[in-house]
Image (tube, coloured by chain):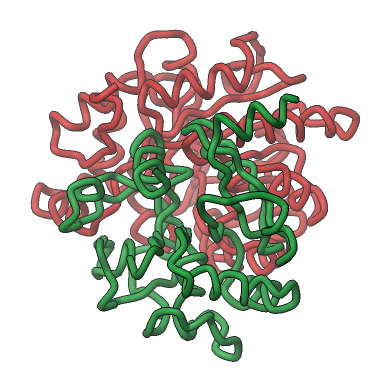
Amino acid sequence: MSELNSSELIKKTEQGLKSRVIVCLDVAHGRVVKGVNFKGLQDMGDPVELAIRYQEQGADEIVFLDIKATLEQRANALETVTRVAENLSIPFTVGGGLNTYTDVAQFLNAGADKVALNSAAVKHPDLIDQIAKGFGSQCVVVAVDLNQEKDQQLEGENYQVFINGGNTPTDLDAMQWLAEVEQRGAGEVLLTAMHRDGTGLGFDNELMSKVSQQLGIQVIASGGASKPEHFTETFLAGSDAALAAGMFHRGEYTVGQVKDELLRNGVAVRNEYLKG
Amino acid sequence: MIEAIINERHKKIGIINTGAGNLYSLNGCLRRIGFYPVTINQASDLERCELSALVVPGQGRFGTVMTNLKASGLDEVITNWYRDNKKLIGICVGLQIMFEESEEDPDVAGLGLLQGKVTRLQSPKQPMVGWADVQSSQDWLNNQTLYFVNSYGVRTSVQSIATVTYGQTFVAAVSSKNMIAFQCHPEKSGIAGEEVLKQCLS
């Protein structure tokens, strides 16, 4: 694992932004679900109720990924987004099934602070430019799902970009795609290491560190977190934000416990949960 | 009947419709802290009810917001409200348009209620997205951790009452006459943000 040394951590802290802890709610048919390696879904509860619970625990942001998003359920999903916007006092991102500019506009107008584009960005990269121009870069999070190719003989870059919920490999060069995403106007990258997702082994910090140093936009680390130490490790490695789902949904840890751990290790985080 | 009860219990806050974004978060936040938000689409909407404050919300880019405000005549509404010493709140781009101009859209003039220019910020990562502590000489604002989303900002202002640092230091809040404007988004800043807005509006 490549880590920042303590003086670099202090420098990062002095730059001013808190390291963000983000809770991801995978939504299917209007319910929060959790799967392992994108498969085997299990019901976790109501999106709005869960979002508020995590906000109270100290979450800095919520990401809703509608992994079963269908056109038929669009009206329902938009209604949920508005309900979240009215009731949550922290920012939230919505992703899944957003294929066109109109799709994105609908969700932003319904109250989402940001949208996460994944497959659509790969299939129609122009969409990133259009949304950045129409709504601002701060609205556009591009989600990139990477899988480490274990058997590959190639040296150097050995991450493959996947789309369609992690089911379809692409020919994209991972680092080139990430650079393109930034250049087209994405405000943040949500980087999921699929080979870590659901394993509980911690974030792929070698990857996060590399991407965070390469890009001029913030990197949200995703995939593999199962305990508070994993957050400390990824922030020390240079991630700007880190996202987890299962460890919170299963009740193994609260967001507050993660932040306690981060504060103990000198990572600057928002500590409003301590006052609550 | 219900309307009458609401009128009696809650102070009404006018939200300027800048035509550049949704108002669900702001409205929800104002309701949670005990106010009743009313959308202001045109000057005549002011006559419908007695407002205890006007808020210029924080979505959209400088040029779009100013162009829309000019088209609806709400630019003059804001200016007159300010000159009459009434309570005025600005959020994010709602702070920026109080100044004379912005590098984001150099061809469009701001309201010019405050002297100065909005410039592109040199932050470690662009855009700035996230939570930061603000420094202020005023206790209610000092060291509050608030949510920022911006690439542009005001480096210095004589009306500054709070600053924030992300790579470089810039204005987090300004105050002039009965106006307080924030570069950050109090309506997205958890309980701290709600307390800040409550303090401004009470």
In the rendered structure, the colour chosen for chain B is: green
Image position of A182 with respect to B29: above or below: below
The residue drawn where x is 55% and y is 34% is B10
**Quadrant hosting residue B25:** top right
Residue nearest the observer in this picture, A11 or A58: A58
The residue drawn where x is 40% and y is 84% is B117
The residue drawn where x is 45% and y is 79% is B113
Q: Position of residue B68 (x, y in %)?
A: 70, 73
Q: Is residue A35 visible?
A: yes
**Quadrant hosting residue A262:** top left
Residue nearest the observer in this picture, B50 or A42: B50
Residue nearest the observer in this picture, B199 or A234: B199
Q: Residue furthest bottom?
A: B107
Q: Residue furthest left?
A: A7
Q: Position of residue A274 (x, y in %)?
A: 24, 24
Q: Could you tell me which quadrant the N terminus of chain B lies in?
A: top right
The chain coloured red is A
Specify whether A157 is left or right of A162.
Answer: left
